[in-house]
Amino acid sequence: MSSGLDWTFAWAVEAGKGKTEAQDACLATTLPNGAVAVAAADGAGSTVHGGVGARIACEVFGRSAGELLELATDDEIRSRSRAFLADTLAEISAVAAEADRPISDFATTFVGVVADESRVVTVQIGDGAAVAGLSDGLALIAKPMATEFVNVTRFLTDKDAEDRLVVEVFLQAANRICAFTDGLQPLIVDERTQEPHAPFFERVFSVLVGASEEPFDERASAWLSKMLSGDPVQKRTDDDTSIVVARRLP
Protein backbone atom coordinates (compact mmCIF):
# COMPACT_ATOMS: atom_id res chain seq x y z
CA MET A 1 0.00 0.00 0.00
CA SER A 2 1.09 3.54 -0.59
CA SER A 3 1.78 5.66 2.47
CA GLY A 4 -0.32 8.61 1.34
CA LEU A 5 -4.06 8.92 1.48
CA ASP A 6 -4.89 9.32 -2.21
CA TRP A 7 -7.94 7.11 -1.71
CA THR A 8 -10.11 5.86 1.10
CA PHE A 9 -12.18 2.69 0.79
CA ALA A 10 -14.49 0.28 2.57
CA TRP A 11 -16.28 -2.98 1.89
CA ALA A 12 -18.80 -5.38 3.37
CA VAL A 13 -20.09 -8.90 2.70
CA GLU A 14 -23.35 -10.35 4.01
CA ALA A 15 -24.45 -13.98 3.82
CA GLY A 16 -27.79 -14.69 2.18
CA LYS A 17 -30.84 -15.89 4.07
CA GLY A 18 -30.38 -19.25 5.74
CA LYS A 19 -26.61 -19.27 5.20
CA THR A 20 -23.94 -19.27 7.89
CA GLU A 21 -21.14 -18.12 5.59
CA ALA A 22 -21.10 -15.97 2.46
CA GLN A 23 -19.48 -17.17 -0.75
CA ASP A 24 -18.74 -13.59 -1.86
CA ALA A 25 -15.43 -11.77 -1.46
CA CYS A 26 -14.27 -8.15 -1.79
CA LEU A 27 -10.96 -6.34 -1.89
CA ALA A 28 -9.61 -2.81 -2.22
CA THR A 29 -6.01 -1.64 -2.11
CA THR A 30 -4.05 1.46 -2.92
CA LEU A 31 -1.26 1.22 -5.50
CA PRO A 32 1.78 3.33 -6.37
CA ASN A 33 1.33 6.66 -8.16
CA GLY A 34 -2.06 7.42 -6.65
CA ALA A 35 -3.88 4.43 -8.14
CA VAL A 36 -6.47 2.14 -6.55
CA ALA A 37 -7.80 -1.36 -7.27
CA VAL A 38 -11.15 -2.76 -6.15
CA ALA A 39 -12.69 -6.18 -6.77
CA ALA A 40 -15.80 -8.18 -5.94
CA ALA A 41 -16.39 -11.86 -6.64
CA ASP A 42 -19.34 -14.18 -6.16
CA GLY A 43 -18.48 -17.80 -5.48
CA ALA A 44 -21.05 -20.09 -7.05
CA GLY A 45 -23.65 -21.05 -4.47
CA SER A 46 -24.01 -24.49 -6.03
CA THR A 47 -20.35 -25.33 -5.34
CA VAL A 48 -18.50 -26.49 -2.26
CA HIS A 49 -15.64 -24.00 -2.31
CA GLY A 50 -16.90 -21.09 -4.42
CA GLY A 51 -16.03 -18.65 -1.64
CA VAL A 52 -12.41 -19.80 -1.70
CA GLY A 53 -12.27 -19.22 -5.45
CA ALA A 54 -13.77 -15.76 -4.95
CA ARG A 55 -11.15 -14.81 -2.37
CA ILE A 56 -8.29 -16.09 -4.52
CA ALA A 57 -9.51 -14.10 -7.53
CA CYS A 58 -9.69 -10.88 -5.51
CA GLU A 59 -6.27 -11.43 -3.96
CA VAL A 60 -4.57 -12.13 -7.29
CA PHE A 61 -6.15 -9.03 -8.82
CA GLY A 62 -5.00 -6.91 -5.89
CA ARG A 63 -1.42 -8.06 -6.46
CA SER A 64 -1.39 -7.65 -10.23
CA ALA A 65 -3.83 -4.83 -11.08
CA GLY A 66 -1.16 -2.13 -11.03
CA GLU A 67 0.53 -3.79 -14.01
CA LEU A 68 -2.48 -2.96 -16.18
CA LEU A 69 -1.83 0.76 -15.74
CA GLU A 70 1.80 0.40 -16.81
CA LEU A 71 0.77 -0.70 -20.31
CA ALA A 72 0.36 1.70 -23.21
CA THR A 73 -2.26 0.11 -25.47
CA ASP A 74 -5.65 -1.50 -25.03
CA ASP A 75 -4.35 -4.70 -26.65
CA GLU A 76 -1.55 -4.93 -24.08
CA ILE A 77 -4.04 -4.38 -21.27
CA ARG A 78 -6.30 -7.13 -22.58
CA SER A 79 -3.36 -9.48 -22.93
CA ARG A 80 -2.27 -8.83 -19.34
CA SER A 81 -5.86 -9.35 -18.19
CA ARG A 82 -5.77 -12.79 -19.74
CA ALA A 83 -2.56 -13.39 -17.81
CA PHE A 84 -4.42 -12.39 -14.61
CA LEU A 85 -7.01 -15.03 -15.45
CA ALA A 86 -4.30 -17.64 -15.98
CA ASP A 87 -2.57 -16.70 -12.71
CA THR A 88 -5.86 -16.94 -10.83
CA LEU A 89 -6.66 -20.33 -12.33
CA ALA A 90 -3.17 -21.57 -11.45
CA GLU A 91 -3.67 -20.65 -7.79
CA ILE A 92 -7.16 -22.13 -7.70
CA SER A 93 -5.88 -25.31 -9.39
CA ALA A 94 -3.17 -25.70 -6.76
CA VAL A 95 -5.69 -25.37 -3.93
CA ALA A 96 -8.10 -27.73 -5.70
CA ALA A 97 -5.38 -30.35 -6.18
CA GLU A 98 -4.40 -30.17 -2.52
CA ALA A 99 -8.04 -30.64 -1.51
CA ASP A 100 -8.50 -33.38 -4.13
CA ARG A 101 -11.44 -31.48 -5.60
CA PRO A 102 -12.26 -30.51 -9.20
CA ILE A 103 -11.56 -26.89 -10.12
CA SER A 104 -15.28 -26.42 -10.80
CA ASP A 105 -15.85 -26.65 -7.03
CA PHE A 106 -14.15 -23.23 -6.81
CA ALA A 107 -16.27 -21.51 -9.46
CA THR A 108 -16.66 -17.75 -9.08
CA THR A 109 -17.65 -14.67 -10.99
CA PHE A 110 -15.37 -11.63 -10.88
CA VAL A 111 -15.41 -7.89 -11.45
CA GLY A 112 -12.31 -5.78 -10.87
CA VAL A 113 -11.51 -2.11 -11.42
CA VAL A 114 -8.16 -0.33 -11.36
CA ALA A 115 -7.82 3.42 -11.81
CA ASP A 116 -5.22 6.16 -11.76
CA GLU A 117 -5.30 9.85 -12.66
CA SER A 118 -5.98 9.27 -16.36
CA ARG A 119 -7.49 5.81 -16.94
CA VAL A 120 -9.95 3.31 -15.58
CA VAL A 121 -9.69 -0.39 -16.49
CA THR A 122 -12.36 -2.99 -15.76
CA VAL A 123 -11.91 -6.76 -15.88
CA GLN A 124 -15.00 -8.95 -15.63
CA ILE A 125 -16.42 -12.39 -16.12
CA GLY A 126 -19.96 -13.29 -15.14
CA ASP A 127 -22.49 -11.17 -13.32
CA GLY A 128 -21.90 -8.37 -10.85
CA ALA A 129 -21.15 -4.80 -11.92
CA ALA A 130 -19.18 -1.64 -11.18
CA VAL A 131 -20.03 2.06 -11.12
CA ALA A 132 -17.62 5.00 -11.26
CA GLY A 133 -17.84 8.73 -10.86
CA LEU A 134 -16.30 10.11 -14.05
CA SER A 135 -16.02 13.65 -15.41
CA ASP A 136 -19.52 13.41 -16.89
CA GLY A 137 -21.15 11.83 -13.83
CA LEU A 138 -21.93 8.35 -12.57
CA ALA A 139 -21.51 5.56 -15.13
CA LEU A 140 -21.98 1.80 -15.14
CA ILE A 141 -18.46 0.85 -16.21
CA ALA A 142 -18.79 -2.93 -15.80
CA LYS A 143 -22.18 -4.25 -16.85
CA PRO A 144 -23.85 -7.50 -15.84
CA MET A 145 -22.89 -10.15 -18.38
CA ALA A 146 -25.79 -11.21 -20.59
CA THR A 147 -26.45 -14.93 -20.97
CA GLU A 148 -28.92 -16.99 -22.97
CA PHE A 149 -30.88 -18.13 -19.91
CA VAL A 150 -32.11 -16.36 -16.76
CA ASN A 151 -30.09 -17.04 -13.57
CA VAL A 152 -27.21 -18.50 -15.58
CA THR A 153 -23.81 -16.84 -15.49
CA ARG A 154 -20.18 -17.40 -16.43
CA PHE A 155 -17.33 -18.31 -14.10
CA LEU A 156 -13.58 -17.87 -14.02
CA THR A 157 -13.24 -21.63 -13.91
CA ASP A 158 -15.24 -22.29 -17.10
CA LYS A 159 -13.30 -23.90 -19.93
CA ASP A 160 -14.08 -20.95 -22.21
CA ALA A 161 -13.40 -18.31 -19.53
CA GLU A 162 -10.72 -16.56 -21.59
CA ASP A 163 -13.21 -16.06 -24.43
CA ARG A 164 -15.78 -14.68 -21.99
CA LEU A 165 -13.45 -12.25 -20.23
CA VAL A 166 -14.58 -8.63 -20.76
CA VAL A 167 -11.98 -5.86 -20.48
CA GLU A 168 -12.85 -2.17 -20.87
CA VAL A 169 -10.57 0.87 -20.85
CA PHE A 170 -11.87 4.37 -20.11
CA LEU A 171 -9.59 7.34 -20.82
CA GLN A 172 -10.93 9.35 -17.91
CA ALA A 173 -10.09 9.87 -14.27
CA ALA A 174 -12.46 8.42 -11.68
CA ASN A 175 -12.95 9.99 -8.28
CA ARG A 176 -15.35 7.33 -6.96
CA ILE A 177 -15.62 3.60 -7.65
CA CYS A 178 -18.03 0.93 -6.49
CA ALA A 179 -18.06 -2.78 -7.36
CA PHE A 180 -20.73 -5.23 -6.21
CA THR A 181 -22.00 -8.75 -6.77
CA ASP A 182 -25.30 -9.79 -8.30
CA GLY A 183 -27.15 -10.12 -4.99
CA LEU A 184 -27.20 -6.34 -4.73
CA GLN A 185 -27.27 -5.62 -8.45
CA PRO A 186 -31.05 -5.54 -9.14
CA LEU A 187 -31.60 -3.22 -6.18
CA ILE A 188 -29.23 -0.48 -7.35
CA VAL A 189 -29.05 -0.75 -11.16
CA ASP A 190 -32.09 -0.31 -13.40
CA GLU A 191 -32.38 -3.58 -15.30
CA ARG A 192 -34.08 -1.96 -18.29
CA THR A 193 -31.93 1.16 -18.76
CA GLN A 194 -28.73 -0.16 -17.16
CA GLU A 195 -28.49 3.12 -15.25
CA PRO A 196 -27.13 3.19 -11.69
CA HIS A 197 -29.53 4.43 -9.01
CA ALA A 198 -27.79 7.73 -8.32
CA PRO A 199 -29.24 8.48 -4.83
CA PHE A 200 -27.97 5.14 -3.53
CA PHE A 201 -24.45 5.65 -4.81
CA GLU A 202 -24.24 9.27 -3.70
CA ARG A 203 -25.22 8.16 -0.19
CA VAL A 204 -22.71 5.31 -0.16
CA PHE A 205 -19.84 7.47 -1.39
CA SER A 206 -20.67 10.21 1.12
CA VAL A 207 -19.95 7.81 4.00
CA LEU A 208 -16.28 7.65 2.97
CA VAL A 209 -14.55 10.61 4.58
CA GLY A 210 -10.98 9.39 5.08
CA ALA A 211 -11.06 10.16 8.78
CA SER A 212 -8.03 8.03 9.74
CA GLU A 213 -4.42 7.73 8.62
CA GLU A 214 -5.18 4.41 6.92
CA PRO A 215 -7.01 4.05 3.60
CA PHE A 216 -9.39 1.41 4.99
CA ASP A 217 -12.36 3.17 6.62
CA GLU A 218 -13.66 0.93 9.42
CA ARG A 219 -16.57 3.22 10.23
CA ALA A 220 -17.75 3.21 6.62
CA SER A 221 -17.38 -0.58 6.45
CA ALA A 222 -19.55 -0.95 9.54
CA TRP A 223 -22.15 1.29 7.89
CA LEU A 224 -22.07 -0.84 4.74
CA SER A 225 -22.49 -4.03 6.79
CA LYS A 226 -25.50 -2.55 8.55
CA MET A 227 -26.95 -1.52 5.22
CA LEU A 228 -26.55 -5.00 3.71
CA SER A 229 -28.10 -6.69 6.75
CA GLY A 230 -31.01 -4.24 6.97
CA ASP A 231 -34.59 -4.89 5.89
CA PRO A 232 -34.48 -2.79 2.67
CA VAL A 233 -31.90 -5.23 1.28
CA GLN A 234 -32.81 -8.46 3.08
CA LYS A 235 -36.47 -8.27 2.09
CA ARG A 236 -35.56 -8.00 -1.58
CA THR A 237 -32.90 -10.69 -2.01
CA ASP A 238 -32.04 -14.12 -0.62
CA ASP A 239 -28.57 -14.07 -2.16
CA ASP A 240 -25.22 -13.18 -0.63
CA THR A 241 -24.54 -9.47 -1.02
CA SER A 242 -21.24 -7.65 -1.19
CA ILE A 243 -20.06 -4.16 -2.02
CA VAL A 244 -16.71 -2.37 -2.13
CA VAL A 245 -16.44 1.40 -2.49
CA ALA A 246 -13.49 3.74 -2.96
CA ARG A 247 -13.28 7.52 -3.06
CA ARG A 248 -10.41 9.73 -4.13
CA LEU A 249 -9.57 12.25 -1.43
CA PRO A 250 -9.20 15.95 -2.27
Image (tube, helix red, strand yellow):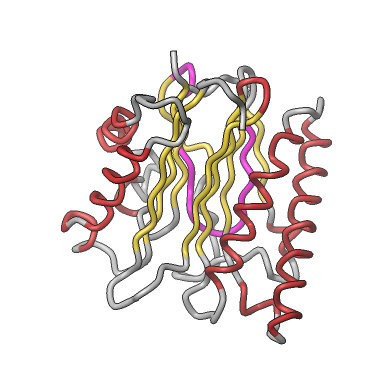
Q: From the image, which quarter does the C terminus lie in?
A: top left
Q: Is residue 104 magenta?
A: no
The residue lying at 37 percent from left, 50 percent from top is 191
Q: Is residue 122 magenta?
A: yes
Using the rendered image of the protein, determine whether residue 132 is visible from the camera's viewpoint.
Answer: no
What secondary structure predominates along the stretch shown in magenta?
Answer: strand
The residue lying at 47 percent from left, 44 percent from top is 179
Q: From the image, which quarter does the N terminus lie in?
A: top right
Could you tell me residue 232's position as x and y percent?
Answer: 18, 54
Viewer-nearest residue: 63 or 203: 63
Viewer-nearest residue: 41 or 168: 41
The residue lying at 76 percent from left, 58 percent from top is 162
Q: Quadrant location of residue 118?
A: top right
**Residue positioned most to the top:** 250
Above or below residue 116? Residue 219 is below
Above or below residue 145? Residue 172 is above
Viewer-nearest residue: 239 or 30: 30
The residue lying at 29 percent from left, 78 percent from top is 18
Give, as a single range, the part of the protein colored magenta: 121-136
Q: Is residue 185 left or right of residue 36?
A: left
Q: Is residue 104 left or right of residue 134?
A: right
Could you tell me residue 4's position as x and y percent?
Answer: 55, 20
Using the rendered image of the protein, determine whether residue 99 is visible from the camera's viewpoint.
Answer: yes
Could you tell me residue 231's position as x and y percent?
Answer: 16, 58
Could you tell me residue 181's position as x and y percent?
Answer: 45, 55
